[in-house]
Amino acid sequence: MRRTIPLAAAVAAAIGVAVAVGTAPAVAGKSASVCPNGQVRFGVEPYDSGPKFVGAYKTLTGLLSRNLGCQVKLFIATNYTAEVEAMRAKKLDVG
């Protein structure tokens, strides 16, 4: 039961971000692409090693890809520090 709540919360938060990102150009009235270089690199740090974790984020990246109109690549970092360093090195667009 403990793992279900964090997984559900993470997926709900990520869906909220996806909706916000997907509607941002329409709200701003811009026609600019939300996908730099035709893709978005999305990073997460694992809090669970089970298949539910990977499956949930693969589903999320698929939904993001469809709604943004470009490929969303999933990057699973080894830990929080690795994700931050990847963002600092400009290897991730969002985490």
Image: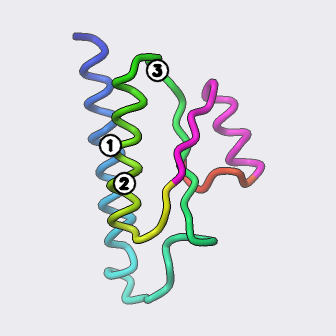
- Residues shaded magenta: 73-89
Identified by mark 2, the residue type is: Val
Identified by mark 1, the residue type is: Ala
Residue placed most toward the observer, 28 or 57: 57
Give percent across and percent down for residue 82: 69, 32
Residue placed most toward the observer, 69 or 14: 69
Q: CA distance from mark 1 to mark 2?
A: 6 Å
Queried whether the magenta region covers residue 20, the answer comes back as: no
Q: What residue did someone put label 3 on?
A: 47
The C terminus, quarter of image: top right
Q: Quick one: SS at disc 2? A: helix
Q: Would you place residue 21 above or below residue 55 in this image?
A: below
Give percent across and percent down for residue 22: 35, 68
Q: Which mark is residue 21?
A: none
Q: CA distance from mark 3 to mark 1?
A: 15 Å
Identified by mark 3, the residue type is: Tyr
Contact, mark 3 vs mark 1 (Cβ under 8 Å):
no
Q: Nearer the viewer, mark 3 or mark 1?
A: 3
Q: Residue furthest left?
A: 1
Give percent across and percent down for residue 91: 70, 51
Residue in the image at 31% along x and 38% along y: 11
Q: What residue did someone put label 2 on?
A: 17
> Pointer 1: residues within 10 angstroms few (<14), some, or many (20+)?
few
The N terminus, quarter of image: top left
Q: Would you place residue 16 above or below residue 76 in this image?
A: below
Residue in the image at 68% along x and 47% along y: 87
Contact, mark 1 vs mark 2 (Cβ under 8 Å):
yes
Q: What residue did someone put label 1 on?
A: 13
